[in-house]
Amino acid sequence: MTTLSPVGAKSQPGSTTKKSFGKTPDGQPVDLYVLTNKSGAEVSITNYGGAVVSLKVPDRNGKLADVVLGYDTVDATVKTACTAASRVLIRLCGAQKHFLKKAVSL
């Protein structure tokens, strides 16, 4: 079981660290959770939609490399999340679903 290290603490094997990642355009704080396993592999995940910002895993020589095309800023993450959501929402425009015998427009 891992415990949450204080904000700003250095990631250590088998730990979870919380860091500030910035603020959304409307001023909401966004945190970054860095999970590190005992082998040193680490994943950085925001509390803004669970966006994976970084995934560092060892290559065949044991050197860590980031294998995710994440973003370094909240602004870039927000824009990308909105773009991804827009692709799905456009498909729902004008759609209707029936819920409890009533038509609900999406």
Image (cartoon, grey):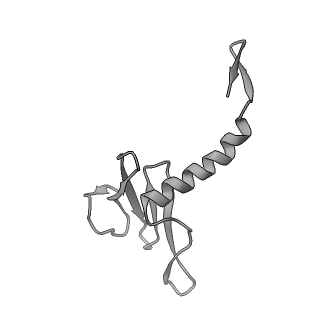
As displayed, is residue 5 above or below residue 90?
Answer: below
Q: Position of residue 9 (x, y in %)?
A: 26, 65
Residue 1 visible in image: no
- In the rendered image, the quadrant that contains the C terminus is top right
Residue at (49, 66) in percent of width and height: 54
Residue at (37, 69) in percent of width and height: 13
Residue 20 visible in image: yes
Apparent side of residue 84 relative to residue 63 in the rendered image (left or right):
right
Q: Position of residue 82 (x, y in %)?
A: 56, 49
- In the rendered image, the quadrant that contains the N terminus is bottom left
Q: Nearer the viewer, residue 53 or 27?
A: 27
Q: Position of residue 52 (x, y in %)?
A: 51, 59
Residue 2 lies in what quarter of the image? Answer: bottom left
Apparent side of residue 45 relative to residue 20 in the rendered image (left or right):
right
Residue at (43, 66) in percent of width and height: 37
- Total tally of numbered discs in the picture: 0
As displayed, is residue 13 above or below residue 84?
Answer: below
Residue 105 lies in what quarter of the image? Answer: top right
Q: Nearer the viewer, residue 8 or 62?
A: 8
In the picture as drawn, the residue positioned furthest to the bottom comes out as 61
Residue 80 lies in what quarter of the image? Answer: bottom right
Apparent side of residue 3 relative to residue 63 in the rendered image (left or right):
left
Residue at (36, 46) in percent of width and height: 28
